[in-house]
Image (spheres, rainbow, N blue to C red):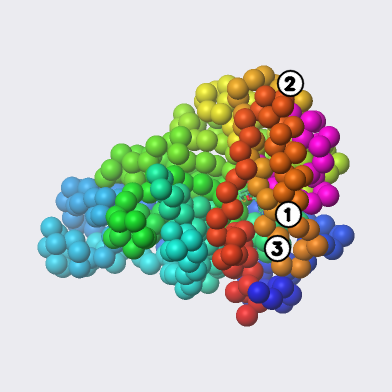
Amino acid sequence: MTAPSASPTDLGVPAVRPSDETAPMALQMAPRRRGKPPKHFADLTPAERAASVEAMGEKPFRAKQLATHYFQHYTSDPEQMTDLPKATREALATTMFPPLIRATRKLEADGGTTVKTLWHLFDDAKVESVLMRYPHRTTLCVSSQAGCGMACPFCATGQLGLTRNLTTAEILEQVRAAFRSLDAGEIPGGPTRLNNLVFMGMGEPLANPRAVIETVRTLVAPQPEGFGMSARNITVSTVGLVPAMLKLADLGIPVTLALSLHAPDDDLRSELVPINTRWSVDEALDAARHYFEVTGRRVSIEYALIKDMNDHGWRADLLGEKLNARGRGWVHVNPIPLNPTPGSIWTASERAVEDEFVARLRGHGIPTTIRDTRGSDIDGACGQLAAEEDDE
Ligand code: SAH
């Protein structure tokens, strides 16, 4: 894969820059104004769905029929909605299910059980999702923004800058596509259901809180109003936008929270996760602890191990101390071997260093599991595929 160098000016985002440049990218909290994608059935609450159907001169019960097709049969194709009169289903489907995402590339790994899809949105913005099937569960990694404004220098998406927020339906369409593919038996191992979802694709989910929260509501709503997923199997991963973390705690839907920490000290974290200049390590950890107190859900701390950067034994000790200072049993740590991005001088830590880091954390009594790095041979680090595409 070639290093991204061309400026994707057509997207109105900053030029892609290699991650080893010293000048940091600017943080971008809000997207530039762009046209909005058309409203879609999946953007609506059940009451709004019924009202929209009625506004088209149809009986409100048609909304439930449409919801059953969409959230239970995973289709928006009028041809398959044979319980509706032909003219009705054509009209309803055209209005309610405008095409929002279009798969333009699929990459497979692990014998077809890992599938990464590049999606083009209505305005040609690009996002990715990754479906990973394991023996006892199936996980989808979704994007919540096109690009990302958080500018983390080791992350491929961070180098793209923020293009725009995705709408609820643009996120849910990634999910529906995964359910459909699994249901149709397209992934080796026989038909199955999606049971895990992580907001670890492109974007900072808590910088797009409204759409992400509406997405979560629909993911957990029982079929046919939503996909009927379990909140505990949904993970929202954040750089540590403290006010949004506090709001998420009050949502009343106990999703799992992951905090991308990557360093226990402010000096280094401000370099690796620039938003740390606004909310420090201690503030982010306090918000994570608060999340546990309110929801009872154990928080995950994400820690990409970068050779000679953040993988020192003393940093493992400092992390262990900071976590234990906030209590026991509320947190676990997920070290992730760095997936190097094009143009970066950084690489993953040595295996022995990784083992030592894990052993030290466990020595402090912190449950620690190395994150599996599926799909690294298909540009697993999210954003790499879109970065490459922009370069072509
Ligand atoms: N913006 C959110 C979610 C997206 S990234 C967040 O930062 O949490 C999901 C996880 O992948 C984050 O922990 C992120 O720091 C990590 N990540 C990004 N680039 C990576 C890379 N090159 N190697 C390993 N992990 C990476």
What secondary structure is found at the residue carrying circle 2?
loop
Cα–Cα span, label 1 and label 3:
11 Å
Instruction: Let me know if residue 307 is in the magenta part.
Output: yes
Magenta residue span: 302-320
Tell me which label, 1 or 2, sits earlier in the chain. 2
- Which image quarter holds the N terminus? bottom right
Q: Residue 164 at x, y = what percent?
A: 59, 60
Q: Earlier in the sequence, mark 3 or mark 2?
A: 2
Q: Left or right: 286 with respect to 48?
A: right
The residue depicted at 17 percent of the width and 51 percent of the height is 59
What element does badge 3 sit on? Answer: loop
Give the amino acid type for the residue marked by disc 2 in the picture: Ala
Q: Residue furthest bottom?
A: 392
Residue 224 horizontal/vertical position (percent): 26, 45
Residue at x 16% of width, y 68% of height: 87
Q: Secondary structure at mark 1?
A: loop
Q: Residue furthest front?
A: 352
Residue pointed to by mark 2? 325
Q: Is the residue 154 above or below the residue 332 in the image?
A: below
Count of marks, rendered view:
3
Residues under numbered marks 1 and 3 in contact, where contact means CB atoms less than 8 Å apart: no
- Residue carrying label 3: 341
User: Would the CB of label 1 be found within 8 Å of ligand 1?
Assistant: yes
> Would you say 117 lies left or right of 327 here?
left
* Residue 297, image x, y percentages: 53, 28
Residue at x 37% of width, y 60% of height: 187
Q: Amino acid at mark 1?
A: Ala
The residue closer to the viewer here, 83 or 72, is 72
Q: Residues within 10 Å of mark 3 (few under 14, many from 20)?
A: many
Q: What residue did someone put label 1 on? A: 348
How far apart in space, not on screen, are marks 3 and 2 (Cα)? 34 Å
Q: Quadrant of residue 214?
A: top left
